[in-house]
Structures are given as structure tokens and as C-alpha cells.
Image (cartoon, grey):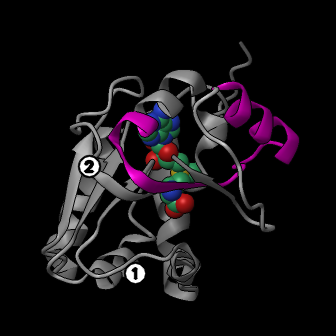
Amino acid sequence: MKISPFGTNMDRMPRLAFRMMKLMFDIRDRLVSVGSLLDRFGIERGQTVVDYGCGTGSYLNQASKLVRPEGRVLALDVHELAVEAVKKRSVREGWTNVIALLTDGRKIPVPDETADIIYALDMFHMVADPEAVLGELNRICKKEGFLFIDNGHQSRQKARTKIISSGLWDIIEEPKRYHCCPK
Ligand SMILES: C[S@@+](CC[C@H](N)C(=O)[O-])C[C@H]1O[C@@H](n2cnc3c(N)ncnc32)[C@H](O)[C@@H]1O
């Protein structure tokens, strides 16, 4: 398995690397709002949305707004610093419907068929066991739910092969930035 200091195939990155990433994302979030991507995912009021590999929570403001107070956003990450950052940010921003949860990158602490929409952005390349994660995402997704997952820092072909070979997800749409996978 190929391991790189930048996170490929390693799940949990070193704390220093996470802190450096947080610094970059904090600057990015001040300059641009990345959350508008979520407007393409059909997220509706009252839904349960999972932000898988949420990092420092760059997409959570938009997710929280789209589901409204009646819905909820489960923000999951394998790094304790991500969970800590999202908890602090939720208090600061007043996101009452965001719940930050730590996962171990294999078993996701969410009951079966919970999520209407799951999105996993800029993280797929880091996943050490894609089959296990795609299986778990399938388990927690509702029957009519969707997974939106992007390539991360790997080729589109590589990401596509991982998704299809899981045998659990189809790809019905492939816009430039992500793969749309119905359960
Ligand atoms: C580059 S950051 C992207 C964060 C966020 N999705 C964004 O686009 O701003 C990737 C995140 O995925 C998390 N991660 C890596 N492997 C994971 C896994 N197997 N399960 C859950 N999270 C994971 C990392 O800890 C990191 O916070």
C-alpha cells in the first residue's frame, strides 16, 4: 500500500499535517465559499445529511442551512482534531443541527438507513480501506438515498474503479467534480 505524508491511503494524518491543512482551509474559507457545490445535491429541508470526511467543516454552513433546523447534518471524520474543530465552529456559528462524530475509518457510528444524502469531498484518496468505507456508507444510506463522492487527489478512473468494484454503488451521473451514486 502506498503511503504519503500528504494523506494518500492513510486515513488519519499526523496532527501537525492536520493543523497545517486547517490553516489553509481557514484561509480558503475566508476567501471563497465552497458550500455552493451542495446546491447540486438536492438536499431538502428536514433531511439527514452526512458530511463524510468533514475536515474542518468548510461545507457545513451550507449543509446546515439547506436542511433547516428540522433536519440534521452528521459530520464525521477519522481525525479527533476535525471533530474538535467542527464542535467549536458549530458553537461559534450557531449550527444547532450539526452533530460531529469520530469514526475509525472502518465502522461508522451511525445506525442503518439514516442518511438521505451523503457527501464525501476531497477525501476519497485518503481512505485506506475504500471497500469497507463504501460498504459502511451504503449501510447508513436510506433506500432512496444518494452518495455524492469526488475523486479527491486521485484520477477519476481510479475513483470510479473503486466505486464500481465495491459492488454496492452505481454511478448514474458524473459531472466534472463528483460521482452521483444512488443506493
Ligand atoms: C483534505 S480533508 C477535506 C475535508 C473536507 N471534506 C473538505 O473538503 O474541506 C480530508 C479529510 O478526510 C478525513 N479522512 C481521511 N480518511 C478518512 C476516513 N477513512 N474516514 C473518514 N474521514 C477520513 C481526514 O481526516 C480529513 O479531515
144 shown above or below 131:
below
Q: Quadrant of residue 117?
A: bottom left
Residue 129 forms part of the magenta stretch: no
Instruction: Name the residue nearer the viewer: 64 or 25.
Output: 64
Q: Is residue 78 left or right of residue 37?
A: left
56 shown above or below 94:
above
Is residue 13 visible in the rendered image? The answer is no
**Labels 2 & 1 near each other (Cβ < 8 A):** no
Is residue 127 visible in the rendered image? The answer is yes
Look at the numbered disc 1 and give the secondary structure of its residue: helix
Dot in front, 2 or 1: 2
Q: Residue 114: image x %, image y %?
A: 26, 49
Q: Which mark is residue 114?
A: 2
76 shown above or below 50:
above
Identify which amino acid the numbered label 1 is placed on. Gln
Q: Is residue 130 left or right of residue 142?
A: right
Q: Which mark is residue 62?
A: 1
Residue range in magenta is: 137-166
* Residue at the (68%, 21%) spot, across then down: 3
* Residue at the (36%, 38%) spot, across then down: 79
Instruction: Name the residue nearer the viewer: 7 or 17.
Output: 7
